[in-house]
Each structure stands twice: as structure tokens, then as C-alpha cells.
Image (cartoon, grey):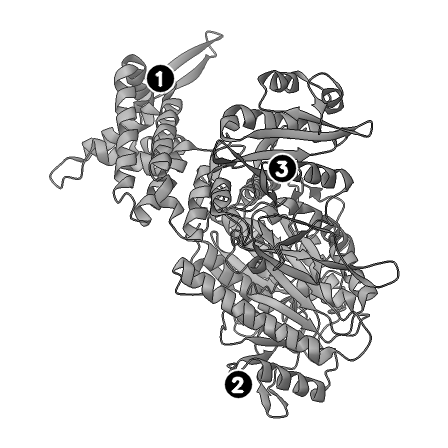
């Protein structure tokens, strides 16, 4: 893969491959069974990247997952939209380094193949299976009317087989396994009104018909499980088809990954009147500001290819040419350097439009992202499903107020982050802004209500996204000293561990990164030299076992059963044969899955350096040597231990140099640190801005300012930070801390996964690693030095209360000396109680506790004042 998969993507790939392996086995049994399963992932989760990884493994295997390649695999990628197929084809090429153009075949007339070939992905869409398609001409189906004037049995022009016959021949070949990917599975099977005959086509494809067999394996990809199940029901899928375990991607993990924008900011008029042009000017200023902000960020990062943000103007279904002409007049007036070719539309009419002096050409939706000269895009409804444009930063909608659903649909196309990662500490660049000139507070709230649920692929904001109304930007507080900021950057944060991790791969990734950034040019060679030394030592330390392993690889033991009818007895005999080169190669490939392919390859080079005059026996012996080492006790443990040692040493050695790299490169090293089954220390960065609501409507529909406090690290121009998001006792904790004479400043720790948020790893009730983010950091001066305190108010009644306390206690045991205080606060019997996590006895009590409430009520806690 060209991309490093996120944890949730790797998990989904592993689950999908497990299902596909089972499905293949079920189909090739003496009594074949057909099967199906769903992969459900929210918009922006990277379903095509996951699919690319699965297809790569099907065709070429996956050592990390110990998945053998399937030499019988053929993939049929099916959707109801040819443009969606084409976009998917290019995304597969973009994501995979093992799937080339020759592996991806668009089925077009004339198509000559008797059957599909293994190792290829074939793209089909609904229209190509219709009765009028040249690919299907002559196909006989008792449930479908025959084309008038066409002779019965007439085959396709220039083809020996209909596409239906090609599919049938592929399914019936015992040396092939046809895997069908049903992309956007909720479409084209009766859940939409695209075409009346589509449910029938998909039903026939999946279930079989007129003597044509059913699809062996159906892998549906959809936004929700319910949509896939409804689609399969609409297609009347046969009850004999086995349903394999669904693969569900947790939207919380998608949000944490940084692939989706964190905030949706809604603006609308707060008084009656015609304010469409006023808000349009506001939207234009926002996109101009966004352009400057991205340009500045690119300059800071040394990026020569900055993000070029886009504004989407959503019109009614029947656009008023005069309205669009007036809108473009305003945009060009407000945006002085906008060029005349910077506007395009994606209307269903693929023709150039003229609005007064403005000429607006059509552009295909899938081209918008890369057509960076387009700065304003005019659209109607939700734009075709499957289209995403991460550089869309601002949307203004001229839809009427009743079209809340259409607003949310379009927002679903705009949620990806432009850099496929979160911009550290910059909430403005991690947001999408939506301006609604024809909406009032009530109808804007309707939009919020839809967004607050899982709608059209938008994940629940409780998982990390916020919906903000008329948000204002908070900037670094001018009254906060530099010493406070430096104290924030000095404290430790933690990565969330992985369930499984390979230290050797982690070291290899680190070596590649260090060499790429010029910090240690020969890091790869040095890392492998350290690992080769470990393997050399293993052969010497376990010499008898090593020789036994060599003998085992070089010989194949077998048994013979001889029956002597005349004597009336059976004789059991044994035999041995020398292993041939193919058997040795198989043993070496098994070793490569243990040590990783890179280490196995370079160790062979270490044992048998390239020599044109050398005999092949030396290379053969090296393969045997590596294969035998993999069979030794503790071989992998010793190698992993050395890899961990070198990795830790290099990360410590280059810690300061890494902090001087760009955000993108620093994220690479944070990902490498996280490639561990234990929490790893990572650094915090100082936030640059934060988007917060400062006003709301009261019960009488009057706009009132929200309560605020001073001395927050980020603030408005008056030094104020809104605190309306805090509950009553969180506010009490804040006020108590700010009355302490030594308190200098405070920080509301972001609840989302970002580089400016302090994270602490903990085990949840299911035994999986999660990350808690304490509510508050307070800064105070002691002995002339600024120290940081963690104070985390959290209800003891929540199911995660005790697991979070145990995680906080573990963190305090390791990093306590670097903080002034680490405290957890809860309200018990209407009184605030505090646990001091820097106290070893308190930590011991937490470790042995089975109730958070008992801890706060008992002697381990004290009154919080």
C-alpha cells in the first residue's frame, strides 16, 4: 500500500479478509454455499483505501495478517453509476502499489472474454446489464421482455459471449472464485428511484436466474448496516445465502483519526429581512480568509503545494438565473483577485451556463478536487454519492429553509480534511463553515438536529465533532506569559496503544523516516545490522536446536502403510526425502512472515553477499539458515527486544530534531511512536486558535452573551473565554482553582484527538485501550518555576469512571514528578471530593477498587476546596 492504514482501517481489512477466506471455503466445498457480508463505514472513513488493501491481499497475500494469496480470486466491482466506478478505479490506483492499470478492467463492449481472469478487478454498472446493453444482447430471461425485432438467441455484436455468460463461466470454473463488491450497496436495489429495473438487475446478479448461478460471495459497502440489509431485502436475496459477520467501522475512531473535519460552523440571520447578499459577502470573506490561512500554513510548513480552498454555492433545484447573476456579481466584487474562469457548476445539464456577463462551464464532480483553478462551485442537491471534495471549506446555501435535509446531504460531501490529517492546534483549518441566508434559528436548529444523529454518513458529534452556531475565533491570550506556554509544551501526553504491534516493523518505519528527513542517512542499514547481529547470536546460542531445525527443513519425513493380504497383516513404514528448492522457498517465506520480509531479505544478503563467481549453493544455504532461525525458541522475542531498544534510543536521540520538522513529518513520528502495545510518550503542541460560540438566544429569542472567564490560554480580543459548555460543578472546579493565589492560567483540554490535547491511555470495561482527555490544566508558579496541574472532574456514576481513574493512576505513577498536582474530582452527596493521584496509597486503593463511588466516599478522598 502507498498509504499507511489507520488502526480502524487495519482492523476492518483483517475482518473483511477473514470473511472472504471463509466465504471461499464455503463455496468450494462438495456442497457449495453462497454468502454475503457488509462493510459499513461513515463518509470519509477511507472505504476505497480499505478495499485496496483487501484486494492487494487477495491477489498477493498479506504477511502482517498471515493471509495467503488466493490464486483463484476474481473481483467484480459493481455499482449503479459508471462515474462512481471510474472514480473508484483511480482511487484504487492511487492507494495501492501492487494493483496496476492492467489489474483493473472496465467491462465495455466489445468484451471478448469467455470468463474473467484471476488477479483482476472488473468494473460493471447496472446499465451494462440492462436488456438494451450491447454486452447482454441475446441473453434469454423468462422474466424480461424480449427486444422487438431482435431474433431469439442473437448474440452481442463482435462478442462470442454475453457478459452474463462470462459471469456464469467464471462462477462455474472450479479454479476461480468470484468476489462481488457491491459499492454504495444501498443504491440501485430498490431504495432509490433511479430506475425501476435496477432492483431486478441486482436481484438477478446476486441470486442467479434462468439457469445462471448465484454470485458466490457478495461484499456490500454502505454507510450503515441498516442500508445494506434493506438493500439485500429489496433484492429479495435468497434465504439460502449465508450471512457472515458484519464489518463495522466505529465512527468515533474515524473522527479521532483526523480524516474528518472537527467542527461544522453554521451562520444564519438573527433578524427578519432580506440578508442573502449580506451573508453572501460574509461567506466570500470567509473563503478569502481561508485562502490566506492555508497559504500562511503552507509557508510555515515549507509546503510548495498549498491547499486551495473552495466555496460551494448551493442553489434551488430550479435556479433563478437573475439570482445567480446577482450572487456572482457580489462574489467577484468582494473577492477582488478572483479570475473569471474560477467558477463552475455541477448541474445535471452538462452545458455551459451564462448568468449575465458570467460564463460558468460544467465540471464533473469527481474532477473538482484536483481542478484547483475552480474556487466557486455552484451545485443543486447533494451532488452524486461517492463524490468528496476535501478542499471545500465554505458553503452558502440559497435553498429555502425547508430544505434542511439537502443541506446535510451536501455537508456530507465536504467533511474530509484536505490533508487527510488534522492541522495541529488550529481549529479554524479543521472546520467547515455553512451559511444559511434563508434559515432562521428554528430551521437552523433543525439542521443541527439532523447533524447530531448519524445522518447521510456524518458521524455523531458526541464522537468528536461539534456543531457551532455563529462561532468566533479565540486566539492566544496576550496576557499569558511565554513561560506558561513552554510549560504546556514540556508536559507528557500519551499515544493510544495498538492491540498488536510488530517492533521490527516499527524500527524499519523509524529508520525510513529518519533517513527521509536527513537525520540519520544510513538508518536503514544500521537498524538491520543490529538485527542481523541478534540473528547471528541466535544461531550460536541455540546451536543443537538450530542444526535440528536445518535438518528438518532439508528433509521431508513421510509414512507408508503396506497391507499384506496373503499374510493378513498391515505394515507401517517410514521414509524421508530431500527437500527441493520449492520446499525451501516455502520455508523461507514462512520465516519472512516471522521476521518481516525486509529483515529476511537483508539477512540473506548478509549471509551470502552478491558474488558473480559464487555458486548458487551459498544462496540456498542462506535461505535454509533464515528458515531454521525462525523455528528457534525465543527467536522473535529476542529480535523484537532489540528492535524496541534501538527504536527507543533513536526516538530519544532525535526528539528535539523531530520537533523542528513540519507538522506532516511530526505526525509520521507520532504514528511510529504509537506502533506499540504499550502507551508511548508524545509531546503536546501549543494551540493556535479555537472556535467557540460566544452568544445564544434566550427564552424570549433575544441574543445574549454567554458567560466567560479570564486567563484561558486562548481568548477573544478582551481576554475572555466562553464557559457555557461547562456543567455546574465543572464551573465550580474552575472557579475554585482560579481563586488560588498562585494560579497563572488555565486550559480547557480539547476532548478530541489532536496534538494540542493531553491524552492518557486507559483500559475500558471491554479490555480495549482507549484515551481519556482530562478536562482542565492549571498553571501555577512554585519556586520560581511554572508547573502544570491536571484536574479532571468526572461523574463517578459513569461506566468509564473507574477505568479512567486506573489509567490516570498509572499515568501519575510514571509521570507524576513532572506535574504539580494530578487530581480527579467528583460530586458525592452534593459535595465535591478529590483523589490525589500523586499519592501512592491513593493509587494503590484505585488499583484494588471495584467502585469509583466508594473511592470518592471513602478515606482515600478528601473534600475539594
Could you tell me how far apart the alpha carbons at marks 2 and 1 are, in whole angstroms?
Answer: 83 Å
- Residue behind mark 3: 774
Residue 67 appearing in the image: no
- Residue behind mark 1: 575
Q: Residue 325: x percent and y percent?
A: 66, 87
First in sequence: mark 2 vs mark 1: 2
Which quadrant of the view contains residue 655?
A: top left
Which quadrant of the view contains residue 696?
A: bottom right
Q: In this view, does 404 lie to the left or right of 761?
A: right
Could you tell me how far apart the alpha carbons at marks 2 and 3 are, in whole angstroms?
Answer: 50 Å
Between disc 3 and disc 1, the foreground one is: 3
Tell me whether the residue at label 2 lies in contact with that at label 3, contact meaning CB atoms closer than 8 angstroms.
no
Q: Residue 863: x percent and y percent?
A: 73, 25
First in sequence: mark 3 vs mark 1: 1
Q: Residue 159: x percent and y percent?
A: 53, 70
First in sequence: mark 2 vs mark 3: 2
Amino acid at each position: 500500500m502507498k498509504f499507511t492504514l489507520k488502526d480502524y482501517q487495519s482492523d476492518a481489512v483483517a475482518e473483511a479478509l477473514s470473511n472472504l477466506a471463509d466465504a471461499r471455503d464455503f463455496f468450494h466445498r462438495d456442497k457449495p454455499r453462497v454468502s454475503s457480508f457488509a462493510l459499513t463505514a461513515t463518509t470519509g472513513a477511507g472505504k476505497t483505501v480499505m478495499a485496496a488493501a483487501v484486494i492487494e491481499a487477495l491477489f498477493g497475500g498479506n504477511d502482517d495478517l498471515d493471509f495467503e494469496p488466493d490464486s483463484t480470486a476474481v473481483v467484480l466491482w459493481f455499482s449503479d453509476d459508471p462515474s462512481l466506478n471510474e472514480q473508484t478505479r483511480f482511487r484504487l490506483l492511487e492507494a495501492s502499489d501492487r494493483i496496476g492499470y492492467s489489474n483493473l478492467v472496465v467491462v465495455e463492449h466489445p468484451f471478448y472474454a469467455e470468463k474473467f481472469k484471476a488477479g483482476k478487478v472488473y468494473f460493471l454498472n447496472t446499465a451494462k446489464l440492462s436488456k438494451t446493453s450491447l454486452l447482454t444482447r441475446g441473453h434469454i430471461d423468462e422474466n424480461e421482455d424480449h427486444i422487438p425485432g431482435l431474433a431469439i438467441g442473437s448474440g452481442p455484436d463482435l462478442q462470442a459471449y454475453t457478459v452474463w455468460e462470462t459471469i456464469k463461466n467464471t462462477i462455474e470454473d472450479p479454479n476461480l472464485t468470484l468476489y462481488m463488491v457491491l459499492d454504495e450497496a444501498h443504491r440501485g436495489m430498490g431504495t432509490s428511484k433511479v430506475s425501476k429495473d435496477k432492483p431486478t438487475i441486482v436481484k438477478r446478479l446476486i441470486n442467479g436466474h434462468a439457469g445462471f448461478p448465484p454470485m458466490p460471495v457478495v461484499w456490500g459497502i454502505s454507510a450503515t448496516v441498516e442500508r445494506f440489509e434493506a438493500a439485500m431485502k429489496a433484492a429479495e436475496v435468497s434465504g439460502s445465502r449465508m450471512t457472515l459477520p458484519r464489518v463495522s467501522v466505529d465512527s468515533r475512531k474515524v473522527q479521532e483519526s483526523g480524516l474528518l473535519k472537527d467542527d461544522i460552523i453554521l451562520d444564519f440571520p438573527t433578524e427578519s429581512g432580506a440578508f442573502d447578499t449580506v451573508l453572501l459577502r460574509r461567506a466570500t470573506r470567509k473563503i478569502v480568509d481561508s485562502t490566506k490561512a492555508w497559504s500562511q500554513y503552507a509557508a510555515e510548513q515549507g509546503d510548495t503545494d498549498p491547499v486551495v480552498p473552495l466555496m460551494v454555492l448551493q442553489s434551488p433545484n430550479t435556479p433563478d438565473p437573475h439570482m445567480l447573476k446577482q450572487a456572482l456579481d457580489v462574489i467577484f466584487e468582494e473577492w477582488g483577485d478572483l479570475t473569471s474562469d474560477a467558477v463552475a457548476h455541477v448541474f445535471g445539464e452538462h452545458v455551459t451556463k451564462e448568468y449575465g456577463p458570467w460564463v460558468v462551464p460544467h465540471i464533473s464532480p469527481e474532477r473538482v478536487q484536483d481542478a484547483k483553478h475552480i474556487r466557486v462551485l455552484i451545485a443543486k442537491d447533494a451532488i452524486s454519492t461517492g463524490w468528496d471534495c476535501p478542499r471545500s471549506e465554505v458553503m452558502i446555501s440559497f435553498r429555502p429553509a425547508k430544505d434542511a435535509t439537502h443541506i446535510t446531504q451536501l455537508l456530507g460531501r465536504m467533511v474530509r480534511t484536505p490533508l487527510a490529517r488534522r492541522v495541529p492546534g488550529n481549529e479554524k483549518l479543521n472546520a467547515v463553515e455553512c451559511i444559511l441566508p434563508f434559515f432562521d434559528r428554528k430551521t437552523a436548529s433543525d439542521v443541527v438536529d439532523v447533524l447530531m444523529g448519524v445522518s447521510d454518513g456524518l458521524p455523531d458529534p458526541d464522537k468528536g465533532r461539534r456543531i457551532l452556531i455563529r462561532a468566533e475565533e479565540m486566539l492566544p491570550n496576550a496576557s499569558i506569559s511565554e513561560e506558561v506556554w513552554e510549560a504546556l509544551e514540556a508536559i507528557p501526553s500519551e499515544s493510544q496503544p495498538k492491540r498488536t504491534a510488530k517492533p521490527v516493523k516499527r524500527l524499519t518505519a523509524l529508520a525510513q523516516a529518519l533517513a527521509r528527513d536527513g537525520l540519520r542517512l544510513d538508518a536503514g542499514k544500521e537498524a538491520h545490522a543490529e538485527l542481523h547481529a541478534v540473528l547471528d547470536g541466535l544461531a550460536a546460542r541455540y546451536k543443537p536446536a538450530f542444526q535440528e531445525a536445518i535438518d528438518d527443513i532439508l528433509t521431508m519425513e513421510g509414512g507408508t502403510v503396506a497391507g499384506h493380504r496373503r499374510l493378513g497383516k498391515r505394515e507401517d513404514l517410514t521414509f524421508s526425502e530431500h527437500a527441493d528448492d520449492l520446499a525451501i522457498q516455502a520455508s523461507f517465506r514462512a520465516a519472512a512472515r516471522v521476521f518481516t520480509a525486509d529483515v529476511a531479505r537483508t539477512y540473506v544478503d548478509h549471509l551470502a553477499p552478491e558474488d558473480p563467481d559464487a555458486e548458487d549453493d551459498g544462496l540456498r544455504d542462506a535461505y535454509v539458515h533464515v528458515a531454521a532461525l525462525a523455528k528457534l525458541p525465543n527467536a522473535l522475542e529476542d529480535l523484537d527486544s532489540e528492535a524496541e531498544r534501538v527504536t527507543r534510543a533513536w526516538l530519544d536521540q532525535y526528539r528535539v530534531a523531530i520537533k523542528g520538522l513540519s507538522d506532516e513529518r511530526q505526525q509520521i513520528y507520532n504514528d511510529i511512536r504509537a506502533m506499540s502495545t504499550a502507551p508511548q510518550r508524545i509531546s503536546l503542541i501549543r494551540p493556535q486558535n479555537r472556535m467557540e460560540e460566544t452568544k445564544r438566544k434566550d427564552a424570549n429569542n433575544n441574543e445574549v452573551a454567554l458567560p466567560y472567564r479570564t486567563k484561558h490560554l486562548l481568548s477573544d480580543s478582551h481576554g475572555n473565554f466562553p464557559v457555557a459548555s461547562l456543567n455546574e460543578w465543572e464551573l465550580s472546579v474552575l472557579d475554585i482553582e482560579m481563586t488560588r493565589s498562585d494560579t497563572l492560567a488555565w486550559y480547557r483540554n480539547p476532548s478530541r484527538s489532536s496534538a494540542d490535547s493531553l491524552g492518557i491511555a486507559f483500559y475500558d470495561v471491554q479490555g480495549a485501550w482507549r484515551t481519556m482527555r482530562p478536562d482542565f490544566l492549571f498553571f501555577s508558579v512554585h519556586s520560581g518555576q511554572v508547573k502544570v496541574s491536571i484536574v479532571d472532574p468526572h461523574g463517578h456514576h459513569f461506566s468509564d469512571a473507574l477505568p479512567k481513574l486506573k489509567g490516570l493512576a498509572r499515568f501519575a505513577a510514571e509521570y507524576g514528578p513532572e506535574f504539580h498536582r494530578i487530581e480527579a474530582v467528583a460530586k458525592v452527596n452534593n459535595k465535591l471530593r478529590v483523589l490525589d493521584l500523586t499519592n501512592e496509597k491513593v493509587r494503590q486503593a484505585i488499583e484494588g477498587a471495584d467502585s469509583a463511588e466508594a473511592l470518592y466516599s471513602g478515606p482515600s478522598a478528601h473534600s475539594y476546596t
